[in-house]
Image (cartoon, helix red, strand yellow):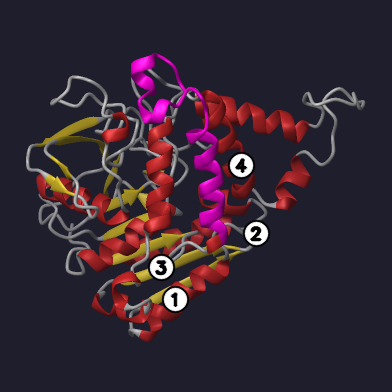
Amino acid sequence: MSTTNSIGIVRAQRAQFDTPLTFRSGAVLPRYELVYETYGKLNADKSNAILICHALSGHHHLAGHYADEPKNIGWWDNMVGPGKPIDTDKFFVIGLNNLGGCHGSTGPSSIAPETGKPYGASFPMITVEDWVESQARLADRLGVKQFAAVIGGSLGGMQALQWSLAYPERVRHVLAIASAPRLTAQNIAFNDVARNAILTDPDFHGGDFYQHNVVPTRGLRLARMLGHITYLSDDAMADKFGRELRTGQLNYGYDVEFQIESYLRYQGDKFAGMFDANTYLLMTKALDYFDPAHDFGGDMNKAFARSKSDYLVISFTTDWRFSPQRSREIVQTLLHNRRNVSYAEITSTHGHDSFLMEHPHYFDVMRAYLDNVASEVSR
């Protein structure tokens, strides 16, 4: 990941909310905290703010590094910074860790004030709509009444779309990247298999594993391995690993023999050591539940009739988890509602992970669109 023109040293901030948040499920969270980072400066009339919504395993640390962790580079540092496509010389950029997350915002591993123990299984089931509501409250706290743009990839793109539906007057532009208007049955199936790997781990303890001083490592590891396969393209795996053997010969057993097996197990172990199992369950369920058309008899055109934003929709040719067809469905719905929409289908070999990669065509599209957004913003 490139650190050229990095924004440099950043720090996380914390906002506490004492107004109860009622979830779409009907559950109520009496109070909560959101961890976030900001980059760039908010202009005088507060018209240059951009919100970036993260995907399943993302968080608030988008760009730069921490003073005491110089190697901890933000996950979108190649995209966000001075002179980069999301230019912090022009925009005030906000990244946050979603509610229910495991990187500082209130989530299942947080201590519940009522019990003095981690929320665990008692943490409410959360939806994209709930996230957008909590994000809007953070925007209010920061004095941002309207975003110049809301941007997200994958699950983050769903949040960006929801912003234009829940708060049509508060977002001028939406950039939905490698996303979908709702999950296919196949995607829901992948998520269910991943969740079952966690739910059936003996160390899961119904979600209250914190009190047993264990982690459902095996389940979380398998969930990540499965997910990671779906984020890559067949071409990417073939180019990087092919059928290369780890030791150069077949051992005729069940231990790691192929390099792709070694890679997946490494990714699984790494993820299991840094991510919370309950958060993984919540995030995948939020993916499953997102369906703007649900309250409109399944009619996506009616769901987007209230939108007033302009849109940039981007897809990648080898992304089979969120295929270009799904992005084109978004575009068709927006055109039906006579919204201004630009669409780019980027040729890439990296599969769903393409939205994280530094690809010249992709970056040029982002830069050109956001330069136009910047031209609308007062200095």
Question: Is residue 261 something that shows in the picture?
Answer: yes
Name the element at disc 2.
loop
Q: Which residue is mark 3?
A: 312
Mark with earlier residue (2, 1): 2
Disc 4: CA contacts within 10 A as few (<14), some (14-19) or many (>=20)? some
What numbered label is drawn on residue 126? none
Give the label, 4 or 1, closer to the camera. 4
Residue 26 to residue 213: above or below = below
Residue 45 image offset from top left, x and y in percent: 10, 57
Question: Is residue 376 something that shows in the picture?
Answer: no
Per the model, the C-alpha gap separating discs 4 and 3 is 30 Å
Residue type marked 2: Thr
Q: Which residue is mark 1?
A: 331
Residue type marked 1: Val
Per the model, the C-alpha gap separating discs 4 and 1 is 30 Å
Quarter of the figure with residue 325: bottom right
Per the model, the C-alpha gap separating discs 2 and 3 is 19 Å
Residue 347 to residue 299: above or below = above
Quarter of the figure with residue 120: top left
Along the line of sight, which residue is nearer the eye, 78 or 108?
108
Name the element at disc 1.
helix
For image coordinates 64% across by 44% down, the residue present is 229
Residue 188 sits inside the magenta stretch = yes
Residue 96 image offset from top left, x and y in percent: 29, 41
